Each structure stands twice: as C-alpha cells, then as structure tokens.
Image (cartoon, rainbow, N blue to C red):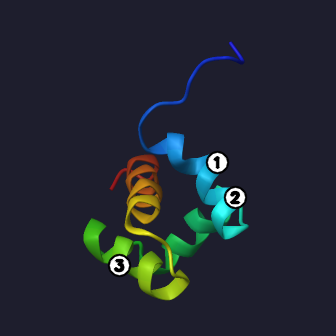
Amino acid sequence: MADEQVMGPKSYFPSIEKTYGQPIDHWMRELDAVRDKRHGEQVTYLKETFGMGHGHANAIVSVYRKDNGL
C-alpha cells in the first residue's frame, strides 16, 4: 500500500533528507565510522560533526543500530 503511513524513527527521514541535503544511506555510511560506539556517542557524533539536531540524529542512530543488530 503506497498510502501506508511511516511510523517511528523512520518518519523523520523525509525531513532529514530535506534539511541536510543527503539521502539516509549517506548518514548510515557515516555511522560506520563510529559503529563500535554507544548509541549516545553516535548521536553526539552526528550532532557535533554535521550540525544535526538531536531528534534527527537520534532517529538515524536508532534505525542504524536496529538494522545492524547493535
């Protein structure tokens, strides 16, 4: 169903792509650099390195960790 509403952290993805001008895959690859860090450290990495807001960084990290079994 094309009209199915996205819920949870992924619901932030369109706004993240629009705000920071990069596809989500870009941010997932960036997190590979800090893969072994804890959740909060990964969020801080996105915030400090790329100027990302906390909510956006947290959404990306949450999905990254789930997708990578972390």
Quadrant for the N terminus in the image? top right
Secondary structure under the numbered disc 1 in the rendered image: helix
Q: CA distance from mark 3 to mark 2?
A: 21 Å
- Of marks 3 and 1, which one's residue comes earlier in the chain? 1
Q: Which amino acid type corresponds to the residue marked 3 in the rendered image? A: Thr
Disc marking residue 18: 2
Quadrant for the C terminus in the image? bottom left
Q: Residues within 10 Å of mark 3 (few under 14, many from 20)?
A: some
- Whether residues under marks 3 and 2 lie with C-beta atoms below 8 angstroms apart, the answer is no
- In the image, 27 versus 35, the foreground residue is 27
**Can you say whether 39 is above or below 65 in the image?**
below
Find residue 65 and report its image quarter. Answer: bottom left
**Can you say whether 12 is above or below 1 in the image?**
below
Q: Is residue 38 visible?
A: no
- In the image, 68 versus 64, the foreground residue is 64
Q: CA distance from mark 1 to mark 2?
A: 6 Å
Seen at 60% across and 18% down, the residue is 4
- Of marks 3 and 2, which one's residue comes earlier in the chain? 2
Find residue 61 and report its image quarter. Answer: bottom left
Secondary structure under the numbered disc 2 in the rendered image: helix
In this picture, residue 4 sits left or right of residue 35: right
Q: Which amino acid type corresponds to the residue marked 1 in the rendered image? A: Pro
Please tell me whether mark 3 or mark 2 is closer to you in this view. 2
In this picture, residue 8 sits left or right of residue 38: right
- Whether residues under marks 1 and 2 lie with C-beta atoms below 8 angstroms apart, the answer is yes
Q: Which amino acid type corresponds to the residue marked 2 in the rendered image? A: Lys
- Whether residues under marks 3 and 1 lie with C-beta atoms below 8 angstroms apart, the answer is no
Task: Say which residue label 1 marks.
Answer: 14
Task: Say which residue label 3 marks.
Answer: 44
Secondary structure under the numbered disc 3 in the rendered image: helix
**Can you say whether 48 is above or below 36 in the image?**
below
Seen at 52% across and 48% down, the residue is 12
